[in-house]
Image (tube, rainbow, N blue to C red):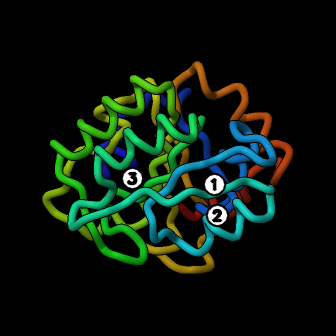
Amino acid sequence: WLDFLGVEAEPDQVMVVAGGQTALLSILLAFARRGEVVLAEALTWPGALAIAQALGLRLEGVATDAEGMVPDAFEEACRRHQPRLVYTMPTLHNPTTATASRARREAIAKIARAHGVILVEDDAYGFLVEPRAPPFFAIARDVTVYLTSLSKPVAPAMRLGYVAAPAALRRRLVAAFRATTVMASPILAELA
């Protein structure tokens, strides 16, 4: 599934999780602390807002255009807030449906690297786009945590997802996944 979405990851870089929302909860729990700023597109997925609020995080919006997050606005937000993370949905963004080009993704990745910001890429709708731009994980694997789930492409009851992350970030992620859900459902994993 990840290969189909353009994510070339080694098996030890992939974690099976209990859906996209649980994955995002665990990712934010692993890398952000109460009161800290997490960046996201100015309009963002309501599930991300709910998670940030529950964790006591300040979700700050970054200006967008037809391709999603605007690089200059992202750079300014990084300078102003010094975030650890940016949550982004670069393919068929929810709710705007904006899709970033490869050039836009490369610009955002360059800024993230320069500021030491982890890109949290939510690819819930990537399966609907063909051809698709490469995911951030293909462009900036070292600073990207990629997540996708099967609830959109297969069925809402298929609460199973996948997270790909570089080795440097895995330890904290594994601990957070263990704390939030222990493991994904083995029955759902087998069905997938």
Image coordinates of residue 85 in percent, x first then y, are: 56, 41
Q: Is residue 7 above or below residue 180?
A: above
Q: Which residue is mark 3?
A: 1
Q: Do the CB atoms of the residues marked 3 and 1 lie less than 8 Å apart?
A: no
The percent coordinates of residue 36 (x first, y second) are 71, 44
Residue drawn at the location 68% of the way across and 47% of the way down? 28
* Numbered badge on residue 5: none
Label 3 close to label 2 by CB (< 8 Å):
no
Which mark is on residue 21? 2
Q: Residues within 10 Å of mark 2 (few under 14, many from 20)?
A: many
Question: Are the two marked residues, 2 and 1, in contact with CB atoms closer than 8 angstroms?
Answer: yes
> Along the horizontal axis of the image, is 113 left or right of 4?
right
How far is disc 2 from disc 1 in space, using C-alphas?
A: 5 Å
At mark 1, the secondary structure is helix
Q: Quadrant of residue 71?
A: top left
For marks 3 and 1, give the one nearer the viewer: 1
| Above-or-below relation of 132 to 114 | below
The residue pinned by badge 1 equals: 24
Mark sitting earlier along the chain (3/1): 3
The correct choice, above or below, for 179 with respect to 130 in the image is above
Q: Position of residue 179 (x, y in %)?
A: 86, 45
Q: Is residue 42 left or right of residue 139?
A: right
Task: Tell me the mark number nearer the camera, choosing from 3 and 2.
Answer: 2
Q: Is residue 56 left or right of residue 83?
A: right
Seen at 68% across and 55% down, the residue is 58
Looking at numbered disc 3 in the image, what kind of residue is underneath it? Trp
